[in-house]
Amino acid sequence: MAHMLQSPPRAVHRLLPVDPQVRAIAADLYDRVAQEPVISPHGHVPVEWLATDVRFRDPVDLIVTHDHYVTRQLHASGVDPAGLAATAEHDPRAAWRTLNDHWHRFAGTASGYWIEESLAEVLGIGLPLGPEHADEVYDAVAERLARPEFRPRALFRRFGIEFLATTDDPLDHLAHHAALADAGLGGRVAPTFRPDRYTDPGAAGFAGNVERLLAATGSAATFAGYLAALEERRHHFIAHGAVSTDHGVEEPYTADLEPGDAERLFQRVLAGTADAAQRREFRGHMLVQMARMSVEDGLVMTLHAGVLRNHSTPAFERFGPDAGHDIPVPTDFVRGLRPLLERHGLAKDFHLVLFTVDETTYSREIAPLAGFYPSVYIGAPWWFLDAPDAITRFRSAVTETAGFYRGSGFVDDTRAFLSIPARHDTARRVDAGFLARLVAEGRIALPMAERIIDDLVGDLPREVFKL
């Protein structure tokens, strides 16, 4: 396999504009930031990988099993997801062959591009994916994973990660984060407070989760006690370096309730007697309470809205959540967030970052909100929208209304650790192309474009996430 030890030649100008004049400007802009540190303020890489520096088990576990971008595409092609996990019943090489048999289906997709980038740029493997070379590539990946330089900590340093946020349960002890503080990674790893299972009455096991929260903090089973318990856990996260909270909701609906009404509603949802409308009110009020806590303790509040989770009941029953069948739905940020913004939208140093998978809201709702409220920032294209063409559409939709400096900077939102540099590189190339077109059209001067692209990968995410 000596012929596979060197990285294959890659198109130097991949993802840059085709027009030669614009491409030349874009290439220069991209070169300015190509090697800048990676700031990843929202993602799902398990902290255990870095804390234990565990060796990645096999190519399937690394690239296929945990990446719902990949598994959902294979499921749509008729592949049983049960065969995509490396278990005692399933040979990982067989799952890898399945991926390669269907590799043509990933042409033109972001996930296909990221996997190819990861293989070529991170692992230095030059053969293309597909049935012809499936076993050779599998063996090459497995050989790389056995080397010390391909363990998580070594890759963290190699990727040039300045900041990496994980996503964590409010009751997590955060011992892994504490251990990493002195690990000499060269970059910072911080937890993110994700309270959905404790604030959404529709979450599985909600009442039991709240009871565990109250017991862990010694809090009373009242609404005031419940809020105090959440506040205590937020402070625990802050003590371990957290900078943000993360909230995933189907609709960005908020409600500002009087204390007595909130107490009565809390008791109903805890007892399981609240109807759908009451559960919605409670969920919406808790977003207002989370905003209030962020005003008080300084944590950045990120809101990911517009996804109907677990669309397929049979798939959920077989494989559980995060199995690739979460589907985007329309959203209404303007009316939905008004109670929250009426209460906290003008509060000093409150940062609310809005993420959507409903592209229609970018120019109609999110950019205008961010163009007025100093607290509101436009989240980077997320999930179904973090592909090259969608990022370009995003820039076109929001820039004329809100400019470049009301955005969050790029957020990779990934568990696929190997793809982090590819995802950030994608955003840098696409942004370089977008800025280059504005320069070529005489809409901004080149020095301004240079400043903007520097800020998009550095000062902007540092400012928005208070780094």
Image (cartoon, rainbow, N blue to C red):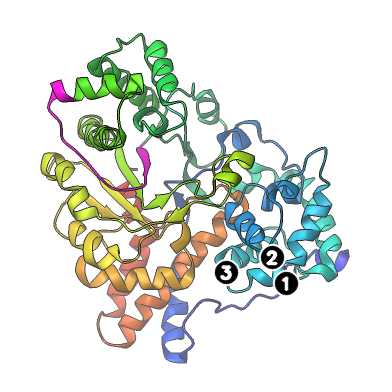
Q: Which residue is mark 2?
A: 120
> Residue at position x 40%, y 60% from top?
381
* Image quadrant assignment for residue 240: top left
Contact? badges 1 and 2 (CB < 8 Å): yes
Task: Look at discs 3 and 1 and give the one toward the viewer.
Answer: 3
Callout 3 crowding tier (Cα within 10 Å): few <14, some 14–19, many ≥20 = some
Indicate which disc, 3 or 1, sits on the residue closer to the N terminus. Answer: 1
Indicate which disc, 3 or 2, sits on the residue closer to the N terminus. Answer: 3
Q: Which percent across, then down, holds residue 147?
A: 78, 46
**Amino acid on which disc 3 is placed:** Thr
SS for callout 1: loop
Q: Which percent across, then down, holds residue 223?
A: 24, 19
SS for callout 3: loop
> Residue at position x 77%, y 59% from top?
98
Q: Where 382 falls versus 108 (above or below)? A: above
Q: Which percent across, then down, holds residue 382?
A: 42, 57
**Amino acid on which disc 1 is placed:** Pro
Q: Which quadrant, please, contains the C terminus?
A: top left
* Image quadrant assignment for residue 320: top right
Callout 2 crowding tier (Cα within 10 Å): few <14, some 14–19, many ≥20 = many
Q: CA gap, disc 1 to disc 2?
A: 6 Å
Q: Which residue is mark 1?
A: 8
Indicate which disc, 1 or 2, sits on the residue closer to the N terminus. Answer: 1
SS for callout 2: helix
Q: Which residue is mark 3?
A: 109
Which portion, as a residue range, is magenta? 243-261
Q: CA gap, disc 3 to disc 2?
A: 17 Å
Would residue 416 be counted in the magenta stretch? no
Relative horizontal placement of residue 461, taking residue 254 as reference (left or right): right
